[in-house]
Image (spheres, grey):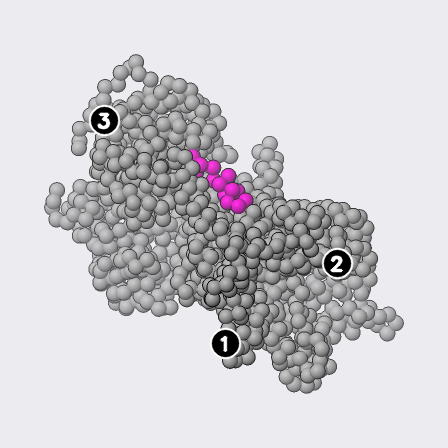
């Protein structure tokens, strides 16, 4: 799967899609600025860029979700207006969103026909769709049971349903937004085979991603977006990952973090046979054993949804579990009312959650109110029966300065800060508590490059001051560069532990896909 | 208990279950499309008044029915405006609609009729009359009385309500409209990206809800009773809501639930029957409260978990 | 993305919403052939034209401050307590049982006990829906509605079968002993020469309501508990992350809410009726929803909105005397206030935000 078939691109044929001078602003934010691209039929075109570079906005314009402020769209050489999704579908555009747009308690078949039914009765639509699905499944290796409910399907299969939906609507142009974010490497490989088949049949594919490897692997041409602008369009065969990365961030990327070798001390966290079953009866953790020593970072790698969130939640006191967890040799309560975030904090555990909008911050609260979040019992924050708001505000100003949170104004609400500054706010709150163990989930998700470096430095400094850190990230680069040891999680289990110096991304990728040993 | 009493209680069960069923199906369409509606009560009340008032004024019950539906639809429009167009809180909107109906019906009734917030009694063609089905009065033991007293002899709205159960099932599960309506209550984003208008679909559902509540209200004033009285919906909209939860948002189950609540209401009108059955002096207030108590028990999940439509209560905001 | 300055959010939007509600109410008055200007004049002179009118306005306001606070506290935990009516009914039962229990020597002794009983009964009536919400996920809006109906049936039963003196006609309790009669404004503010607030029911409870506002303000914005209630109300997952127990907060917020609604009974049952009657609450529990929404769940807002509704109810009663406008018009106004300040908030907010953005951008 290395060779990319180089499709002949007859210069006479019109491009399948051509965008000319597309611009779109949201208030003062220019999400897309004068963007032009041409994608020839029968090719895979990649669009790469950081979070917030404007990729999704561009695709939403193409799918009729937003109206561009300026610019034109040509489909097969014809100027086309796309005021809504219906128009996009009619123009032969199909979209596979990052978050699937499926009705969970409908069957595959019902999802496929939704919106494109033949006539007012369902019966004819359903039988027609059944035959058509069988044909499409055969043709493109898109096998799914048409009568299965979506909620019973794996993520990879749900994605296939999305592709089938687009094909059933006779899409000639298929847009996929970050399609591999939720897939295992094996599922991703399968997806690429499907895309290969589609290309061979003459379909045009636009692949939006921030993963360089995928771009190099599958695309014929690639465009790079940065801060709403299209900075370059190149033939994939004529570029390199390094060049693309540089175009993406606008300067040389620091791929490795400078750090001294770890000097691990005594074990801080000891976990044995940790098991979690969620509300739906699904086993999320199937017997986890691990330990983290003082002065080291244990990185947990894995495709999201393989139990890393459950692990962080149990250790942070958010969910209940069975097994044994010791901190500094003392067992932690894992069930009952004592198993909560408060007792964890009192035991010396700080927790930077994976999702700062959902858990880490109260977006409507001011920065200073958020600084007390989780630590509202701190005696320093009280005066008598009431809370000492003045003391909290002063403490907040101090911590905002230490972590370079901008703007350093404690009274503005958390939602007004940028992603990077919100994350620094959370890190300031958790790290400045001087914990014995820091739990960190996705520390740099949705954070700009400058803040990433700062956050990585802070984590290294904390490690060097003799603290234990458990790091969960889906970014393999981040795991590789920060961790002193790496444990890979798959399906609620730890597949293996490696030293960063003695492994590589291929081996970790195999472990993440549930394949142990040296199968590569 | 003798057959006659039993038939009386069951007959009254059907009559009392009818408005519950109509309102319950109304709520089913709205909530299946993702719009919670605790304003069923208010819509019924408004429809009851306007149907009674127009039926009295024109002497034609059918015009009354139309007026009731129109009144209910107006309130549905307000609910749609608040919860679909302006993405407001659906519960608060429902509460407002209940009070609006409660206040407006009395204010207008006073202005039009000056009888202490009621309409004059309806007579003749201003009321729905019982329909004697063919062969009623047939003299077969057991089956004869059941047919004549229980199945025959209801107003057309009763039969309409019963027919609406299979009709609703068919519409929801066998047609394109039903597929889309159920989809928009589960995942409006899926409907939107399929090129279907979420707003239009939800307004259609809220509209159906309005029509059915209108019929329910008209039934109260022009069939069950002869005219409108202040607060005559008497919590039926809330009982219908409870039945809807009990039925887990499914039409046939809604029928069963509404018959059960209808039976409870019928029994609370016949404390003598209850006393005879239980040989225990049951306070009438307990019978009055029983539907509500039962609803709480159902809501507490002691009778199976009720999972509402996933997108219920949440306004749809298009994400990028 | 469109942001509003805070003053607009706090004052301008509720003001515009209430004005729209009043304008439509005016149209309703026109619709039934009356003159809205005359109606407003009648209401003002009836509710504010004399110390008697003020006495009623403030009496009603006292009720609404309690129920408005009750709804507000629950709202801060994102719980919609529609059960204020039933909780206040039960509070009345608690107050009545205390007042009838012994021959109280002085109101100063009776009042604290009655307050506690009212609050406890109200809280108990909120406890079941709260527990079902916290532990079993039963929707609190529906359960509190059901509990209103159950409360009405229960009170009816208790009054008719137990509290009604033998041979009495009305389903109401015996008159409370004189040692429980609270000082009215007439008692407190009249001088030897002039009698003020003659015959008006406003009593010392008004000041207790104001103290309750202060305590609720302290609770919500100055204590750890209030911080936890607000956190939970903003985001349940975040609250769990921070070690705040949803079950505990749901229970506490609802108990406080029910307690506040129940305490209203010292005003209407102990202070005014001096006996327990059927339907003593007269919709005050529901008006509390409008008061909380209009007052933006802030005690100061609740006082202002409570006063406004006190004025409307008293003015509405005057209307009924002098015009053909029934007092049920108040229910219409209440509905419109709930509709425009609650459900149709965005209808006012979105255009206003656009206006501000344009001005700011220019």
Q: Nearer the viewer, mark 3 or mark 1?
A: 1
Q: Quadrant of residue A92?
A: top left
Q: Nearer the viewer, mark 2 or mark 3?
A: 2
Say which residue label 2 marks: B115
Residue A361 visible in this rendered orientation of the protein: no
Question: Quadrant location of the C terminus of chain C?
Answer: top right
Q: Numbered disc 3: what chain?
A: A
Residue B277, numbered circle? 1
The quadrant where residue C58 appears? bottom right
Secondary structure beneath dot 3 equals helix
Which residue is denoted by mark 3 in the rendering?
A200
Residue contact between numbered discs 3 and 1, judged by CB atoms under 8 Å: no
Precedes in sequence: disc 1 or disc 2: 2
Kindly identify the residue that appears in the image at 49 percent across and 50 percent down: B164
Residue C134 percent across, percent down from the top left = 45, 64
Q: Secondary structure at mark 2?
A: loop
| Label 1 crowd (10 A; few <14 / some 14-19 / many >=20) | few
Residue at 81%, 53% in the rendered image: C41
- Compute the Cα span from label 3 to label 1: 78 Å
Q: Are marks 2 and 3 in contact (CB under 8 Å)?
A: no
Mark 1 lies on a secondary structure that is helix
- Extent of the magenta region: B191-208
- Residue sitting farthest toward the front: B139
Name the foreground residue: C291 vs A412. Answer: C291
Nearer the observer, C319 or A226: C319
**Mark 3 crowdedness (10 Å alpha carbons): few <14, some 14-19, many ≥20:** some
- Tell me which residue sits at (35%, 68%) in the image: A336
Vertical side of B230 occupied by A128: above or below: above
Kindly tell me whether residue C278 is visible in this rendering: yes
């Amino acid at each position: 799967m290395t060779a990319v078939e180089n499709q002949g691109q007859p210069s006479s044929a019109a491009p399948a899609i051509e965008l000319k001078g597309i611009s779109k602003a949201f208030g003062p934010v220019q999400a897309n600025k004068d963007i032009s691209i041409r994608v020839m039929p029968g090719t895979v075109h990649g669009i790469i860029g950081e979070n917030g570079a404007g990729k999704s906005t561009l695709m939403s314009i193409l799918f009729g979700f937003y109206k561009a402020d300026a610019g034109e769209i040509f489909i097969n050489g014809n100027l086309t207006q796309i005021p809504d999704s219906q128009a996009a579908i009619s123009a032969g555009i199909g979209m596979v969103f990052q978050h699937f747009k499926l009705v969970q308690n409908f069957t595959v078949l019902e999802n496929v026909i939704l919106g494109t039914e033949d006539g007012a009765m369902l019966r004819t639509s359903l039988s027609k769709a059944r035959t058509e699905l069988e044909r499409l499944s055969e043709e493109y290796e898109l096998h799914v049971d048409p009568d299965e409910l979506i909620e019973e399907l794996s993520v990879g299969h749900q994605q296939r349903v999305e592709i089938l939906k687009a094909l059933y609507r006779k899409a000639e142009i298929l847009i996929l937004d970050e399609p591999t974010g939720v897939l295992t490497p094996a599922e991703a490989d399968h997806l690429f085979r499907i895309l290969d088949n589609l290309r061979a049949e003459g379909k045009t594919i636009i692949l939006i991603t921030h993963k360089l490897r995928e771009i190099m692997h599958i695309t014929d041409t690639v465009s790079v977006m940065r801060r709403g602008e299209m900075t370059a369009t190149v033939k994939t065969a004529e570029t390199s990952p390094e060049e693309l990365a540089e175009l993406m961030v606008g300067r040389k990327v620091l791929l490795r973090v400078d750090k001294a070798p770890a000097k691990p001390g005594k074990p801080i966290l000891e976990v044995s046979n940790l098991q979690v079953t969620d509300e739906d009866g699904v086993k999320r953790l199937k017997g986890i054993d691990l330990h983290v020593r003082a002065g080291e970072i244990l990185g947990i790698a894995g495709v999201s949804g393989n139990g890393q969130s459950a692990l962080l939640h149990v250790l942070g006191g958010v969910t209940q579990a069975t097994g044994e967890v010791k901190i500094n040799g003392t067992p932690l309560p894992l069930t009952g009312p004592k198993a909560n975030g408060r007792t964890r904090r009192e035991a010396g555990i700080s927790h930077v959650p994976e999702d700062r909008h959902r858990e880490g911050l109260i977006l409507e609260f001011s920065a200073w109110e958020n600084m007390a979040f989780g630590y509202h019992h701190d005696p320093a924050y009280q005066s008598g029966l009431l809370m000492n708001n003045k003391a909290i505000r002063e403490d907040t100003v101090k911590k905002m300065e230490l972590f370079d949170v901008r703007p350093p104004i404690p009274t503005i609400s958390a939602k007004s800060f940028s992603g990077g500054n919100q994350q620094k706010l959370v890190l300031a709150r958790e790290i400045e508590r001087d914990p014995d163990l820091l739990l960190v989930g996705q520390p740099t998700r949705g954070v700009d490059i400058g803040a990433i470096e700062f956050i990585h430095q802070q984590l290294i400094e904390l490690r060097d001051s003799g603290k234990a850190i458990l790091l969960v990230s889906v970014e393999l680069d981040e795991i590789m560069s920060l961790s002193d040891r790496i444990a890979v999680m798959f399906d609620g289990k730890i597949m293996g532990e490696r030293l960063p110096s003695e492994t590589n991304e291929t081996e970790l990728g195999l472990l993440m896909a549930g394949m142990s040993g040296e199968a590569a | 208990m003798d057959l006659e009493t039993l038939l009386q209680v069951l007959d009254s069960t059907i009559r009392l279950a009818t408005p519950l069923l109509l309102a319950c199906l109304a709520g089913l369409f709205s909530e299946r499309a993702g719009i919670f509606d605790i304003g069923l009560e208010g819509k019924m009340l408004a429809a009851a008044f306007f149907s009674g008032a127009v039926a009295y004024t024109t002497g034609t019950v059918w015009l009354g029915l139309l007026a009731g539906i129109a009144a209910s639809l107006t309130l549905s429009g307000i609910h749609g405006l608040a919860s679909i167009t302006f993405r407001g809180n659906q519960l608060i909107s429902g509460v407002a609609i209940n009070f609006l109906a409660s206040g407006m019906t009395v204010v207008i009734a006073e202005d039009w009729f000056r009888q202490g917030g009621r309409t004059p009694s309806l007579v003749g063609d201003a009321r729905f009359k019982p329909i004697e089905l063919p062969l009623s009065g047939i003299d077969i033991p057991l089956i004869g009385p059941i047919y004549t007293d229980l199945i025959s002899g209801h107003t057309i709205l009763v039969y309409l309500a019963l027919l609406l159960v299979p009709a609703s099932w068919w519409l929801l599960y066998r047609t394109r409209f039903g597929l889309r309506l159920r989809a928009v209550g589960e995942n409006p984003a899926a409907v939107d990206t399929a090129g279907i208008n979420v707003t239009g679909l939800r307004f259609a559902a809220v509209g159906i809800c309005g029509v059915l509540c209108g019929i329910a209200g008209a039934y109260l004033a022009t069939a069950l009773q002869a005219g409108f009285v202040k607060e005559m919906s008497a919590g039926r909209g809330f009982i219908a809501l409870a039945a809807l939860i009990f039925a887990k948002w499914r039409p046939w189950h809604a029928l069963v639930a509404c018959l059960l609540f209808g039976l409870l209401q019928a029994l609370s009108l016949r404390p003598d029957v209850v006393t005879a059955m239980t040989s225990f002096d049951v306070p009438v207030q307990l019978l009055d409260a029983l539907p509500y108590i039962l609803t709480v028990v159902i809501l507490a999940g002691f009778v199976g978990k009720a999972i509402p439509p996933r997108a219920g209560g949440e306004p749809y905001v298009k994400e990028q | 993305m469109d942001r509003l300055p805070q003053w607009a959010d706090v004052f301008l939007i509720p003001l515009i919403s209430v004005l729209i509600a009043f304008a439509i109410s005016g149209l309703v008055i026109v619709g039934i052939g009356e003159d809205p200007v005359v109606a407003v004049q009648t209401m003002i002179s009836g509710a504010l034209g004399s110390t008697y009118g003020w006495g009623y306005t403030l009496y009603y306001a006292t009720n609404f401050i309690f129920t408005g606070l009750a709804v507000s506290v629950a709202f801060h935990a994102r719980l919609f307590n529609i059960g204020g009516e039933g909780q206040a009914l039960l509070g009345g039962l608690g107050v009545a049982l205390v007042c009838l229990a012994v021959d109280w020597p002085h109101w100063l002794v009776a009042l604290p006990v009655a307050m506690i009983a009212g609050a406890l009964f109200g809280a108990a009536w909120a406890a079941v829906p709260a527990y079902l919400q916290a532990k079993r996920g039963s929707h609190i809006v529906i359960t509190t509605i059901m509990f209103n109906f159950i409360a009405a049936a229960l009170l009816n039963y208790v009054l008719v079968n137990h509290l009604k003196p033998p041979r009495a006609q009305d389903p109401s309790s015996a008159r409370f002993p004189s040692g429980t009669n609270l000082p009215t404004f007439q008692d407190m503010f009249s001088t030897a020469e002039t009698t003020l607030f003659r015959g008006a029911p406003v009593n010392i409870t008004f000041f207790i309501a104001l103290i309750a506002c202060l305590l609720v303000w302290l609770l919500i914005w100055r204590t750890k508990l209030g911080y936890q209630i607000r956190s939970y109300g903003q985001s349940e997952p975040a609250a769990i992350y921070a070690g705040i127990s949803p079950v505990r907060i749901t229970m506490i917020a609802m108990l406080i809410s029910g307690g506040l609604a129940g305490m209203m009974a010292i005003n209407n049952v102990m202070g005014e009726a001096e006996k327990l009657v059927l339907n003593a609450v007269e919709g005050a529990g529901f008006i509390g929803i409008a008061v909380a929404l209009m007052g933006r769940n802030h005690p100061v807002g609740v006082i202002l909105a409570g006063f406004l509704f006190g004025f409307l109810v008293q003015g509405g009663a005057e209307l009924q005397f002098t015009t053909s406008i029934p007092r049920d018009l108040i229910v219409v106004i209440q509905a419109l206030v709930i509709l425009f300040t609650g459900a149709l908030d965005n209808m006012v907010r979105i255009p206003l935000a656009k206006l501000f953005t344009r001005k700011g951008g220019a």
